[in-house]
Image (spheres, helix red, strand yellow):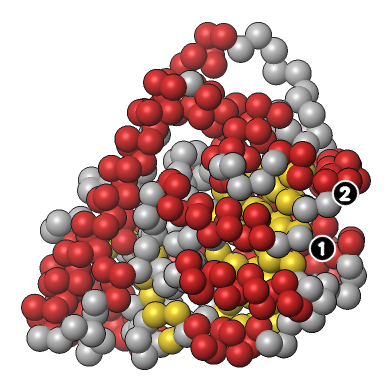
């Protein structure tokens, strides 16, 4: 049977990580996969997570199954973190999932189940796994313009023009904050215009939020998703705990379906649980339990927020350093966008040839579309990257 299998395209981000590991040069710099690294290049276990893990080891009395939709303590705490008081909880159905990717997958599956004809509009560019999951599920994808390569900012006019094509029942995927791969984000007035457009068309917004706390802060990064949740009849939200809790390998995420018609909640909740049952039955609990412990214990939560804030400030500082160094070397403001972008990523606007030259000549690894992971830098490597970019003619 296996001979009938076809080759599958590799994940380019993961393949780049492999190439980096195989590069023998000591001076190499990894700006590839979106994993936070401290200035020493380490992805640490966050202090509050470590403390929760210790407490869990001492206090946990059973590892029996939780619930198909996950532990309510986790889904409730995450709904609070993401939604704040934007919508009453009787209007929210929740599903614990393996990572944000699990939430994205279950969301697309729910869309297909509820409306097999739905098209999903995605930003051009978007996270490659959005596209690969949609293709796998056989859901029709429509791109909307998002990034202006000349300014490295959002092409909002292009985006709105393309959203004119949205029809009733379509889904429009938006990044809640810290857009991956560009780092360019909508302003609040722009979010309001998008909501007005989608509501006029009868389309459903789906928000993927994988970096809450990495952009402008925990509350500020949730402002858009809260606005959309409060102002649209139905919204899907996929949130990841991988980055902001640093628990990548624990696979912890949540899907939320928000509806103004509270009478639909029981039906929607049952369908969410059904999706988990068909794919993997009970979702993983270890990471979810750590998250709910951290979020509901005042001391752990304060320490987690302080560490997350240090991480965020560190990335902002690197952005400013890189923008300033590039301004100094180029004698122009054309790299100012790096300090404007938010989150882990910036798309620099280099050509694939320039990206390849940076790798071959300098051992600097970034994604082929010139996305860099800001957290891959430190005080010493910022000037090295800046000089290499100018040398490569970026
Ligand atoms: N969505 C986006 C845009 C991401 O960048 C990521 C990245 O890691 C995810 C979702 C999901 O991540 P995970 O499945 O590791 O929680
Ligand atoms: O975009 C990134 O780098 C992160 C991490 O298949 C990631 O979202 C990359 C590839 C992948 C899963 C996660």
Observer-side mark, 1 or 2, equals 2
> Seen in the image, is 197 located left or right of residue 158?
right
List x then y, in percent, for residue 138: 82, 73
Quick check: can you spot residue 278? no
* Quadrant placement of the C terminus: bottom left
List x then y, in percent, for residue 91: 76, 45
| Distance Cα–Cα, label 1 vs label 2 | 15 Å
Judging from the image, what secondary structure is the residue with disc 1 in? helix
Q: Residues within 10 Å of mark 1 (few under 14, many from 20)?
A: many
Q: Which mark is residue 264?
A: 2
Name the residue: 45% across, 47% down: 219
Q: Is residue 220 above or below residue 362?
A: above
Q: Which mark is residue 141?
A: none
Q: Which residue, given by chain and number where applicable, does mark 1 sit on?
A: 111
- The one of 358 and 390 positioned closer to us in this rendering: 390
> Seen in the image, is 200 located left or right of residue 12?
right
List x then y, in percent, for residue 211: 47, 53
Res 345 quadrant in image: bottom left
* Quadrant placement of the N terminus: bottom right
Ligand 1 within 8 angstroms of badge 1 C-beta? no
């Amino acid at each position: 049977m296996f001979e009938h299998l076809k080759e599958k395209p590799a994940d380019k981000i993961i393949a780049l990580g492999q190439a980096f590991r195989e590069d023998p040069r000591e001076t190499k710099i990894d700006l590839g996969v979106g994993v936070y690294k401290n200035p020493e290049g380490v992805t640490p276990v966050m202090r509050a997570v470590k403390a929760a893990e210790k407490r869990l080891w001492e206090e946990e009395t059973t590892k029996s199954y939780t619930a198909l939709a996950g532990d309510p303590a986790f889904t409730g705490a995450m709904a609070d973190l993401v939604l704040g008081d934007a919508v009453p909880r009787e209007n929210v159905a929740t599903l614990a999932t393996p990572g944000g990717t699990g939430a994205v997958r279950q969301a697309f599956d729910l869309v297909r189940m509820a409306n097999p004809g739905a098209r999903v509009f995605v930003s051009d560019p978007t996270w490659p796994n959005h596209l690969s999951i949609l293709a796998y599920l056989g859901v029709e994808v429509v791109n909307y313009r998002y990034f202006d390569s000349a300014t490295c900012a959002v092409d909002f006019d292009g985006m709105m023009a393309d959203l004119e094509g949205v029809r009733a029942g379509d889904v429009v995927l938006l990044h809640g904050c810290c857009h991956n791969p560009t780092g360019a984000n909508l302003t609040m007035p722009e979010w309001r215009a998008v909501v007005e457009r989608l509501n006029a068309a009868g389309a459903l917004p789906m928000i993927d939020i994988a970096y809450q706390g990495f952009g402008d802060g925990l509350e500020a990064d949730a402002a858009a998703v809260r606005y959309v949740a409060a102002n649209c009849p139905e919204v899907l939200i996929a949130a990841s705990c991988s980055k902001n809790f640093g628990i990548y390998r624990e696979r912890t995420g949540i899907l939320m379906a928000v509806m103004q018609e509270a009478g639909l909640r029981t039906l929607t909740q049952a369908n969410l649980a059904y999706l988990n049952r068909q794919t993997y039955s009970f979702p993983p609990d270890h990471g979810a339990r750590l998250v709910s412990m951290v979020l509901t214990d005042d001391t752990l939560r304060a320490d987690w927020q302080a560490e997350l804030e240090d991480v965020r400030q560190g990335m902002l500082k690197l952005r400013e350093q890189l923008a300033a160094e590039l301004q100094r070397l180029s004698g122009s403001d054309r790299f100012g966008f790096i300090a404007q972008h938010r989150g882990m990523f910036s798309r620099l606007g280099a050509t694939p040839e320039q990206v390849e030259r940076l790798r071959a000549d300098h051992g600097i690894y970034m994604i082929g579309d010139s996305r860099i992971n800001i957290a891959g830098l430190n005080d010493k490597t910022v000037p090295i990257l800046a000089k290499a970019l100018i040398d490569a003619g970026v």
